[in-house]
Image (cartoon, coloured by chain):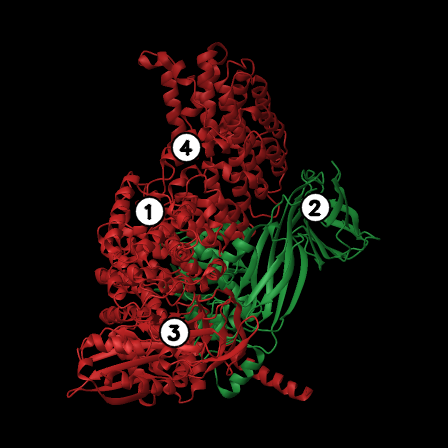
Chain colours: A red, B green
């Protein structure tokens, strides 16, 4: 054992040795190159020669080795371009690693060797057609990364093609390629925008981030492209990968600023105006907000955005958290923006760079709304080990947050900082103290005293900074500080820092009348050292002289003239200039004009106190979280955040078309079923959204004849303008709608008008609850159901509709009392109805495709390329499960409801109707022992507690048949009996219909030939030869989706098997003399042939 | 977005460059070097630097600068976060993110960078996907590769990339499903001179390393195979989650329900607010003084444990940045060993385990530069420690439920409390 491991080790060493040898050599060469370039070149070429040979060898390992060394060269930034011809040959290599490395090489050098690069193009073009999506994607990636202008048309074509690829991954890559092509050739902009428009409609979460990125880069101003996709993007956001989230959030922030009115309304003005008034408490702010709320109602779309971004504050990615924070900052009502602070503070536990950026943003935020971060004051305390830049930022924030309440603790904290070994930081602290002192008048004296103490500090920088700050402070209230000025005058002997000296001189000059004894003496001293002073100090000496000359000319006349003479011959022209100016102004002579009379006023004018401001003050005009904000200057490509519009643009542009297909489907909806107890589903749907499709299933189940009519009504109504989402609009409108709605119902109903009305009331009642919780804004997040989109809440009410429907028999009177105001929602509801919950993947019912698209994106399993559609027809045929004779009076029938995925993706749903034909109650009907073939699973229905005599009840259960027609046997039990029953599915029920275009159909069909194809020629009864009849019959026999067909004589149907999701493609091609070719393409050949057998009689029989 | 990436070591050599768009010359890094020179300390190099035509955003990790070149407006955190993700990936692949590791594996590094970014926009950053695309180097594999000529590039194409749950590989199956939770809590605190604690926040992360089976079918399904119940989750003031966690359930029930990725990952990070007063497990008695007019000072530090539920405090290390005027230190430690670096002026005292009977003490004389003024500030003490089997916030993993399988999974939970940024002012 030991020996073996030893050999491995030694083998390994050998290998390592070989590999590491080369880099060593190259380092050597580098040195050589410095010594003798010519010799080096020679060696270099021989080296490359060697590589070329390796590349041309027949062995993959040699090639790979060569490629690895070349990549090593590229990584070091060495030129390897002359190997291009040898490398490009290997682009079609079978070995994946070689291929990848060649790609790396190509992307790096293709630009320089355009002609040769063209050699590789055909390989990529071929790969673009590969059946494997990943190969298609990577081919597109490389093709678009080769920056060769000649291939622009090829790229354009490839992008167009890829943008309608079935695989979302390929489409994602297409979105990336858009940006690359755009940077290569901006001429293509128009065409690319078309592609972007198309991809924006894409509902895959994979694509969303990338296409928005492309949008931002190519056409950020085409905000109109977003309208229709706005809600979808909001809903998808949570499921998009983290990088995409950042981009989308930033884009939506800009979008929202152009589309909604300001939620800050008037208080925005007030707020800014009040900025100097730091004492505004939170309560006041809240009150203000409340006031505003009375007049302002937020656009539901605006709310939707805020609601859907909130969970992202919990992201692990700091960039996402920051993006949400800036969104709330720029878009949320001021009262709500506070929720981001907690998350931002959390980010401070991260590494230095993240801290830096986050602190910068907090600094800007804290200037405007200090209340947001006040509770976290202590999180900004500085550690001695923090880097200086972090320290300064923290200090900045602490200063911004200072108020009367916390100033004493803050000052104590500042005292620690002043003593810091990091003198730069200590100086910044002194400035911070100065700012606190001016901002909070209560502590000005304390601060001043503290600063004066610092004047005796040993460190010069600290002293200098204190002097400067004291100067500023004294300026604000000069009256009572003669002592301090005297003290500072004494300091002049010791301080050497120019700024500080200049400050002291200025102070003495400015208040020379308060210190009449000292001032001339100071001038005397400084005049002596004038020549050795810094320019800054010299100017102040001149100033001091001038001011003293004007106030106390008796003592200082000669001194001043001496100083002026010195200044006259100074090296700096600035000082010479100043000297001349002062002399003319103060020394009266005949030439001097009227100005000298006012000299005193000019020099000793009351000067306004400087405002000590935060250096972050001016950053707020940049969008937070951007590069421009960090740099405090416009970065290239920075997109200005526009101001809120005065009046919101038409919100209806964001409505998605829902009318189109509703009609089409309703016509062939299956026969109505009786309502059934569905309580269970609601409770379930609350906790497990994925299962909630069951509710919508029961929903369409209960769709009665009259409901269909409603739907037609609803959809025709759509155009007439129940602009679906603006339900919180005006009351008048709703009133009128209400009446029309009622009229319609009266007209529409013939038989069950009673039912509908009650139902309608029921809905509206539900509706009202859900909508009210909507307006509650923040609380709405609590309930899982509400945190979804607007349309979602509609679907929510859609769900509850069948609940009320089933309940209404018990208490119809109560339901009648539904508030009539909300009746208006009936219309909205019907527009969307029947609606499904967004998470249910295979979206059942007659939901319009666009809305489905919006909602479906939420689901995690939308990765399947082809989408399962709604069932087109529900077969009316019921099968007997238990005859009443053998069941001792208990009869059971079942039928396949064709509802996909109620209990799970792989379950076929079965509706079982249990009837009690006895004259006694039957209690506790449930499923007992199951005898299922291996692999098969079953989801029981909820036990029926009690069945009244002559009563019947319908329950649904799910069975996973594993794509086989094997029988599911189980026991149907009552309280005191059990009966063996079994269900055998017809093959047509093991399918779920899918929609696809004809093109896709053909493509898929092309991949399923040979073994996977079964066909038969059948005779077709003459009355069966029309399109409608064929579709009707086929769809009735098997759960297939209709594929639109270009030819009249060919009819195509598509479905996938419930369990394994394999495609099942059915083609009916009518031939002459009433025969037809029936072709089935599928991987599941067994099912295929069974299906063929079953479909045959369907068409041939009359 | 991200145009190019340069990796620069501490001595200023650019040892790797990668371009995702057209090539940017190395000379752009001169601006960076300039800033680096100005900053003196590496820690102080600004993360964002503006140059005439580009912007440089950099991070500093493990003695390497990752400098990315940007041309247009981009959220800086986006880039910073990504660069850290790159460094994490290197760490994950090579065990360390050092210059030598990167140089030795330059081809893998290049392949990784190629997959992680497309045209400057992140493509695959999830370690699970990357590992499917490019296999991490192992000793065995490199031997096998050299014999068989096979490669590090995975020949199966990653399917995870195509799904919405990119963190999970497809078809992972284990005979034994085991989930290990590491609850690591870090205490951030500044303890003031007067021994009043200024604030202490606990930052923690529950890291999970697991070996969990989920069949492909149940991944596709919505049923989540794992549910983790925490005791007193209300403690948590603020949390951030791995994307696999279902936020809805957390919101409504405070239950962590998720399909775990394969391998180690950070499940949640949370912060316990300072309102929940958490006892600090150690105390420090210190006496540091510098005498005026004499070139010496006294140094006396004792560390002791506070009540922490009978758990021992281990791995105690104290580091002190002494003032510049300090020339040398003559100390005696009753426990552990100390070192003083006269160049950087850093005193490190490795204490080890604290036994309450005999408290560790470090005492002695500080030699100051003669003639130099006495340092006005006493240095802060940075302390590290570790307590096994204790989550100081009181958080516990109560129960672990699994869906889709009948048997109970093996669950292991390990609690560790550590010092985060723990500083004692003197």
Spatial CA distance of label 2 from label 3 is 87 Å
Spatial CA distance of label 2 from label 4 is 62 Å
Which residue is tagged 1?
A823
Where is residue A1030 drawn, in percent x and y? 23, 78
Mark whose residue sits in front, 2 or 4 = 4
Which residue is tagged 4?
A291
Q: Name above or below for residue A465 compared with residue A993.
A: above
Q: Name above or below for residue A951 compared with residue A225.
A: below
Q: Are marks 2 and 3 in contact (CB under 8 Å)?
A: no
Image quarter hosting the C terminus of chain A: bottom left
Spatial CA distance of label 1 from label 4 is 29 Å
Residue under the point 36% across and 77% down = A1056
Label 2: how many Cα within 10 Å (few below 14, some 14–19, many 20+): many
Residue A1081 seen in render = yes
Disc with the residue nearer the chain's start (1 vs 4): 4
Element marked by disc 2: strand
Which residue is tagged 3?
A896
Viewer-side residue, B116 vs A541 = B116
Disc with the residue nearer the chain's start (3 vs 4): 4
Spatial CA distance of label 1 from label 2 is 82 Å
Count of picture labels: 4
Whether residue B327 sits left or right of residue B56 in the image: it is: right
Viewer-side residue, A237 vs A454 = A237
């Amino acid at each position: 054992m030991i020996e073996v491991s030893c050999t491995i080790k030694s083998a390994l060493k050998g290998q390592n040795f070989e590999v590491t040898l080369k880099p060593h050599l190259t380092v050597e060469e580098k040195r050589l190159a410095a010594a003798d370039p010519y010799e080096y070149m020679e060696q270099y070429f021989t080296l490359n020669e060697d590589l070329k040979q390796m590349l041309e060898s027949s062995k993959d390992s040699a090639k790979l080795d060569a490629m690895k060394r070349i990549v090593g060269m590229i990584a070091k930034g060495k030129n390897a371009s002359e190997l291009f011809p040898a490398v490009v040959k290997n682009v079609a290599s079978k070995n994946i690693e070689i291929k990848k490395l060649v790609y790396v090489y190509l992307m790096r050098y293709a630009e320089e060797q355009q002609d040769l690069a063209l050699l590789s193009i055909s390989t990529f073009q071929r790969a673009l057609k590969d059946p494997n999506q990943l190969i298609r994607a990577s081919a597109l990636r490389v093709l678009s990364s080769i920056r060769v202008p000649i291939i622009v048309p090829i790229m354009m074509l490839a992008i167009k093609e890829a943008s309608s690829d079935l695989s979302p991954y390929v489409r994602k890559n297409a979105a990336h390629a858009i940006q690359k092509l755009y940077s290569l050739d901006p001429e293509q902009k128009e065409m690319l925008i078309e592609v972007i428009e198309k991809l924006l409609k894409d509902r895959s979460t994979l694509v969303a981030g990338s296409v928005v990125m492309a949008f931002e880069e190519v056409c950020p101003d085409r905000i109109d492209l977003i309208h229709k996709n706005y809600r979808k993007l909001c809903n998808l956001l949570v499921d998009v990968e983290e990088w995409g989230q950042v981009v989308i959030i930033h884009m939506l922030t800009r979008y929202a600023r152009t589309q909604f009115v300001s939620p800050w309304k008037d208080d925005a003005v007030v707020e800014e105006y009040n900025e100097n008034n730091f004492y505004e408490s939170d309560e006041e702010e809240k009150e203000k907000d409340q006031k505003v709320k009375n007049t302002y109602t937020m656009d539901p779309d605006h709310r939707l955005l805020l609601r859907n971004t909130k969970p992202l504050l919990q992201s692990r990615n700091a960039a996402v958290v920051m993006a949400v924070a800036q969104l709330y900052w720029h878009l949320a009502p001021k009262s709500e923006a506070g929720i981001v602070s907690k998350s931002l503070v959390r980010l401070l536990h991260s590494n230095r760079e993240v801290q830096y950026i986050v602190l910068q943003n907090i600094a800007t935020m804290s200037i405007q709304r200090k209340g947001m971060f006040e509770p976290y004051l202590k999180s900004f305390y500085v550690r001695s080990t923090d880097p200086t830049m972090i320290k300064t930022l923290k200090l900045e924030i602490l200063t911004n947050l200072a108020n009367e309440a916390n100033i004493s603790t803050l000052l104590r904290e500042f005292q620690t900082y002043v003593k810091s070994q990091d003198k730069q930081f200590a100086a910044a602290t002194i400035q911070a103290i100065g700012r606190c002192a001016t901002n909070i008048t209560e502590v000005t004296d304390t601060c001043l005293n503290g600063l004066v103490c610092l004047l005796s500090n040993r460190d010069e920088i600290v002293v200098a900074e204190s002097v400067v700050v004291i100067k500023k402070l004294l300026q604000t209230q000069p009256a009572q500080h003669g002592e301090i000025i005297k003290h500072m005058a004494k300091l002049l002997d010791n301080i050497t820092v120019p700024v500080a000296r200049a400050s002291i001189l200025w102070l003495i000059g400015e208040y020379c009348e308060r210190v009449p004894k000292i001032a001339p003496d100071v001038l005397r001293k400084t005049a002596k050292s004038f020549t050795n002073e810094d320019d800054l100090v010299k100017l102040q000496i001149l100033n001091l002289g001038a001011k003293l000359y004007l106030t106390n000319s008796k003592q200082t006349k000669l001194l001043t003239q001496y100083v002026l003479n010195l200044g006259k011959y100074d090296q700096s022209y600035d000082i010479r200039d100043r000297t001349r100016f002062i002399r003319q102004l103060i020394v009266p002579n005949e030439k001097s004009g009227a100005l000298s009379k006012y000299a005193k006023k000019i020099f000793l004018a009351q000067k306004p106190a400087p405002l000590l401001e935060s250096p972050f003050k001016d950053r707020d005009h940049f969008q937070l979280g951007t590069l421009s904000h960090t740099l405090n200057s416009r970065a290239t490509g920075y997109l200005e955040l526009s101001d809120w519009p005065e009046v919101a643009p038409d919100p209806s542009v964001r409505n998605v078309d829902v009318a189109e297909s509703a009609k089409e489907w309703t016509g062939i909806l299956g026969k109505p079923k009786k309502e059934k107890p569905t309580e269970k589903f609601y409770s379930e749907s609350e906790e497990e959204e994925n299962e909630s499709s069951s509710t919508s299933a029961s929903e369409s189940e209960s769709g009665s004849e009259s409901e269909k009519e409603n739907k037609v009504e609803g959809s025709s109504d759509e155009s007439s303008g129940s602009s679906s989402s603006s339900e919180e609009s005006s009351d008048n409108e709703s009133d009128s709608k209400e009446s029309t709605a009622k009229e319609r119902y009266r007209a529409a109903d013939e038989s069950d008008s009673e039912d509908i009305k009650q139902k309608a009331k029921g809905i509206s009642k539900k509706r009202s609850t859900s909508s009210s919780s909507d307006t509650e804004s923040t609380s709405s997040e609590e309930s899982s159901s509400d945190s979804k989109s607007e349309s979602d809440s509609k679907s929510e009410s859609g769900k509850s509709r069948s609940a009320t429907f089933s309940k209404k028999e018990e208490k119809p009177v109560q339901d009648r009392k539904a508030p009539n105001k909300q009746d208006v929602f009936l219309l909205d509801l019907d527009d969307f109805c029947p609606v499904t919950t967004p998470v249910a993947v295979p979206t059942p019912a007659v939901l319009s495709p666009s809305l489905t698209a919006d909602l479906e994106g939420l689901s995690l399993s939308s990765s399947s390329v082809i989408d399962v559609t709604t069932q087109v027809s529900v077969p009316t045929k019921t099968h007997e499960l238990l005859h009443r004779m053998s069941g001792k009076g208990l009869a059971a029938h079942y039928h396949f409801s064709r509802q996909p995925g109620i209990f799970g993706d792989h379950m076929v749903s079965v509706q079982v109707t249990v009837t009690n034909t006895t004259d006694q109650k039957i209690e506790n009907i449930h499923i007992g022992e199951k005898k299922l073939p291996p692999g098969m699973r079953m989801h029981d229905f909820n036990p029926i507690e009690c069945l009244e005599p002559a009563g019947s009840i319908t329950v649904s259960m799910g069975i996973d048949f594993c794509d086989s027609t094997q029988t599911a046997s189980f026991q149907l039990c009552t309280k005191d009996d059990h009966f063996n029953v079994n269900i055998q599915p017809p093959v047509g029920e093991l399918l779920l219909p899918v929609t696809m275009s004809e093109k896709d159909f053909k493509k898929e069909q092309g991949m399923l030939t040979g073994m996977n194809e079964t066909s038969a020629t059948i005779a077709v009864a003459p009355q069966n030869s029309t399109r409608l009849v064929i579709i009707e019959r086929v769809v009735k026999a098997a759960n297939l989706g209709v594929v639109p067909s270009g030819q009249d004589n060919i009819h195509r149907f598509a479905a996938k098997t419930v369990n394994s999701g394999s495609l099942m493609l059915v083609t009916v091609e009518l031939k002459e003399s009433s025969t037809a070719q029936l072709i089935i393409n599928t991987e599941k050949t067994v099912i295929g042939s069974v299906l063929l057998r079953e479909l045959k009689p369907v068409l041939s029989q009359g | 977005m991200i145009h190019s990436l340069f990796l620069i070591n501490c001595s200023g050599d650019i040892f790797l460059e990668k371009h995702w768009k057209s090539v940017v010359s190395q000379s752009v890094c001169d601006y960076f070097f300039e800033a680096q020179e100005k900053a003196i300390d590496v820690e102080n190099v600004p993360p964002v630097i503006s140059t005439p035509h580009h912007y440089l955003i950099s991070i500093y990790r493990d003695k390497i600068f990752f400098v990315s070149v940007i041309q247009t407006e981009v959220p800086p955190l986006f880039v910073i976060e990504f660069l850290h993700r790159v460094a994490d990936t290197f760490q994950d692949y090579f065990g360390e993110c050092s210059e030598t590791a990167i140089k030795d594996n330059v081809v893998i590094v290049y392949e990784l960078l190629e997959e992680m970014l497309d045209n400057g926009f992140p493509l695959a950053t999830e370690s699970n996907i990357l590992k499917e695309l490019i296999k991490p180097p192992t000793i065995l594999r490199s031997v096998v590769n050299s014999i068989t000529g096979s490669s590090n590039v995975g020949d199966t194409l990653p399917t995870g990339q195509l799904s919405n749950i990119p963190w999970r590989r497809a078809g992972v199956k284990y005979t034994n499903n085991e989930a290990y939770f590491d609850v690591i809590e870090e205490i951030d605190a500044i303890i003031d001179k007067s021994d009043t604690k200024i604030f202490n926040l606990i930052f923690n992360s529950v890291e999970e390393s697991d070996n969990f089976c989920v069949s492909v079918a149940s991944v596709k399904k919505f049923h989540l195979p794992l549910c983790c119940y925490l005791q007193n989750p209300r403690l948590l003031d603020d949390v951030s989650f791995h994307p696999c966690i279902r936020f809805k359930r957390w919101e409504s029930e405070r239950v962590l329900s998720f399909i775990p990725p394969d391998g180690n990952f950070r499940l949640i990070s949370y912060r316990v607010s300072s309102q929940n007063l958490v006892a600090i497990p150690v105390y420090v008695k210190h006496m540091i003084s510098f005498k005026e007019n004499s070139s010496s000072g006294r140094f006396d530090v004792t560390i002791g444990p506070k009540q922490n539920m009978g758990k021992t405090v281990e791995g105690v290390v104290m580091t002190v940045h002494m003032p510049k005027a300090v020339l040398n230190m003559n100390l005696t430690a009753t426990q552990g060993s100390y070192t003083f670096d006269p160049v950087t002026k850093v005193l490190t005292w490795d204490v080890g385990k604290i036994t309450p009977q005999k408290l560790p003490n470090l005492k002695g004389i500080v030699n100051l530069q003669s003639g130099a003024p006495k340092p006005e500030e006493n240095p802060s003490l940075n302390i590290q420690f570790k307590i096994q089997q204790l989550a100081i916030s009181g958080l516990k993993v109560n129960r672990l439920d699994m869906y889709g399988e009948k048997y109970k999974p093996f669950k292991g939970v390990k609690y560790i409390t550590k010092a985060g940024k723990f500083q004692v002012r003197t």
